[in-house]
Image (cartoon, helix red, strand yellow):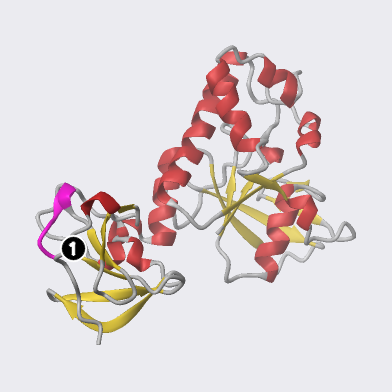
Amino acid sequence: MEIFINEVSLEGQYLTDAEFKDAVIIFKSIFDLLNKKTKQKIIYKEDSNLFVNYDAIKGSNFQQSLNQIKDKSLKLAFKNIVFNKLNAKEWRKEQVHSLNDYFDYFTPQSCRDVRNTSLAEVAERQFQNSYITYLVINFTNSSFIIAHPDISKCCLISIIKNNDETQSIDLDSLDNQAALENWLEKKLKLSKIEYDESSTVPPQDEQTILRDTKRFKRTRIRYDERVVYCEISTGKYWYVDNLHYGKAAHLEVFDKTGQRHLGEADLQGEIDESKSDSEKTINIS
């Protein structure tokens, strides 16, 4: 999954610092939810030095607008999302689209040149790699408001490349947390993989870290009616404990011989070695 921050959605649409602060709070909430719900993603953004080309508060460029936010913790959290290189990468260092191509944001009412922007880059990537999931994050109250036909509260950004209206590149986009919830459900079917801690039955394998097929492979081994998985990189054996559910739900983890119990893991795969039990073993032969 590749996620692009849409700097073009900074259009000087905020009349006061309070309005921009509210937008930053919403923006932060989107990424808080993304980090909570998704693991395998790459976030891309425009060159940090080029954000000054866009206004947030009317008449003030992005940096000037950001400086007007008095809440230091909010400002720091926002900067960490956008400017911390460990979180968001600058796509220009991996640029795919050509500056010789034309990219236009197309609506029934108008056409807007978006060459050499994040929108051009994500459009070209989606055009070349349709098997990858892409998402555009907009700032609130922008002009990117065309309703998505399939996902409630989301928007659709239609990009026309080189004036070819027969091949519109339609990008999923959103600017609020509720829209992200709907998008994640549509794309990732999270309701099927999230475990309800009020449940009275143990979790399914796909509701745990075992759904990561790059990390685990199924074996023919069964223990207490549960499939035992082998961790590919370590040879450790994992399975869902079939006797516990709700907040007590966990996985059992053994070494590659099956004779040494390493501890219990939560559903996200964090092993608690203090819960290792020397009397527990599994037969892997």
Q: Classify 87 as above or below 267.
A: above
- Residue named by callout 1: 278
Residue drawn at x 43%, y 42% as measured from the top left: 33
Per the image, label 1 sits on a secondary structure element best described as loop
Dividing the picture into quadrants, the one containing residue 245 is bottom left
**Residue 174 in the image, given as x and y percentages of width and height:** 53, 44
Question: Magenta residues, as a range?
Answer: 242-248
Q: Is residue 74 above or below residue 217?
A: above
Q: Is residue 171 left or right of residue 201?
A: right
Q: Quadrant of residue 11?
A: top right
Q: Position of residue 150 (x, y in %)?
A: 45, 58
* Residue 185 percent location from the top left of the image: 38, 55
Local crowd at mark 1 within 10 Å, few (<14), some, or many (≥20)? Answer: few
Left/right of residue 16 with respect to residue 256 in the rendered view: right
- Where, quadrant-wise, is the N terminus in this rendering? bottom right
Residue 149 in view? yes
Q: Is residue 236 left or right of residue 146?
A: left
The residue lying furthest to the front in this view is: 278
**Residue 244 within the magenta-colored segment of the rendering:** yes
Which of these two is toward me, 111 or 268? Answer: 268
Locate the C terminus by quadrant. Answer: bottom left
